[in-house]
Amino acid sequence: MPLIKPFTGLRPAPGRAADVAAPPYDVMNLAEARRMVHDRPWSFLHISRPEVDLPTEIDPFADAVYNKARENLERMLAEPVLIRDPHPSYYVYRLTMGSHRQTGLVASASVAAYDSGRIKKHEFTRPAKEDDRVRQIDALNAQTGPVFLVYRANREIDEILMQSCRAPPEVEVVADDNVRHQVWIIDDRATIERLSLAFDALDALYVADGHHRSAAASRVARAKRARDSGSDQTPDAAAEVAAEAPHQYFLSVVFPHDQMQILPYNRVLRDLNGLDQAAFMNRVGAAFQIEPSDTPVQPVGPGEFGMYLDGHWYRLRLDPQRIPADDPVRRLDVSLLQDNLIGPILGVDDPRRDERIDFVGGIRGLDGLRARVDGGDMRVAFSLHPTQMHDLMAVADAGDVMPPKSTWFEPKLADGLVSHVIE
């Protein structure tokens, strides 16, 4: 079974991409999503966040939500705002954010490779979010949110993608956040074959973002395999058909690792765990060198942290002897802060579930941290050095998982530019 395959993409009709393109479903709350669809009847949020079209009090996991997603998809197909390509294709996807640019391939990735560990993950998933994505896929018979995958940069693949971008793009959209999204179609057989073989030669792919979407795709594929095994086909024939079925692959965009931009995922805490400021600072000083700063602190390297407390910034440097060099998880800055301060001093032992801690994506900057503390919502904030791509791959290669909220990838992929129909 190939690692990736071309597929017949479901895409905006000519001239409709700007009407359709939307941010990922999970980067905004419902109130923000409702504002985003105002005067935008064809926004893909009507499919990815269909509760925007339902009463405010609706349970986001109610059957009516998934039924509305299907209804909205059928409406956009009937218009037609969305169309399906006639032949299996790959798609080049380029993101440009200021001076940063990254170019990847939209493809359907093998569920079997994901299940066997050749497509490697580095996070736990939450059952409720996984269930939600399963129900969304089942309702639409399509995967509409791409999984963000990474491959170790490969000259042959990168050259093919660059060559494919020489023509004018099929789609070019500048989103509200000024990120430019461009899409090219690769539909000639020779280039498709070259790309397929080049990816098959890779040892692994890595899930950068989209763990719930990939896990949900695996569950849907497993359920459909069980259904197909009960058909009147011979077992061998049923297995052969199932192996090549669209639902045995999931929508993905695959980028080279050396083009990724990871921003820090910062932390804010509601209180000092019963300590006054002096006692708290004394305990922090036992593990960190503390240096007051007249300006906001963005750490410049591993083992360094910024702290904002009572209107003042501090630079924290961890004692190097506390950094385990041979453990790919415990040497991460998110782990170092958790293991040396947030857990033992602030008493948050389970950051995945403890409501005393919250997380602020690096795109919001240091002002976002300061606002949470100055507004009285939080007591103390910490800025981190971003996790590096080689660290993420080292954790995945070790078969381990990162702490929650370890990476914030930017720019984000758009929803709606290419979707994958599985029936």
Image (tube, grey):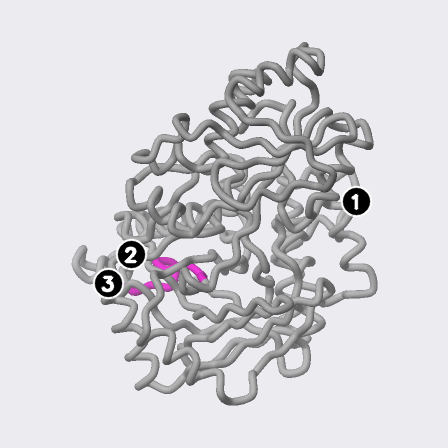
Residue receiving disc 3: 1
What's the CA distance linking mark 1 and mark 3?
Answer: 45 Å
Q: Report whether residue 76 is seen.
A: yes
Amino acid, disc 3 = Met
Amino acid, disc 1 = Pro
Query: What residue appears at the point 26 percent right and 51 percent down from the top-left corner?
Result: 229
Residue receiving disc 1: 55
Task: Based on the picture, tell me whether residue 246 belongs to the magenta stretch.
Answer: yes
Mark toward the start of the polypeptide (1 vs 3): 3
SS of the residue under disc 3: loop
What's the CA distance linking mark 1 and mark 2?
Answer: 44 Å
SS of the residue under disc 2: loop
Q: Is residue 308 above or below residue 44?
A: above
> Percent from the top left, x then y, of residue 334?
50, 35
Question: Which of pointers 1 and 2 indicates the residue nearer the eye?
Answer: 2
Q: Which residues are magenta?
A: 244-252
Q: Is residue 162 above or below residue 175?
A: below
**Residue 227 marker:** none
SS of the residue under disc 1: loop
Of residues 388 and 165, the one nearer the viewer is 388
Residue receiving disc 2: 204
Q: Quadrant of the C terminus?
A: bottom left
> Percent from the top left, x then y, of residue 300?
55, 46
Dot 3, crowdedness within 10 Å: few (<14), some or many (≥20)? few
Amino acid, disc 2 = Ala
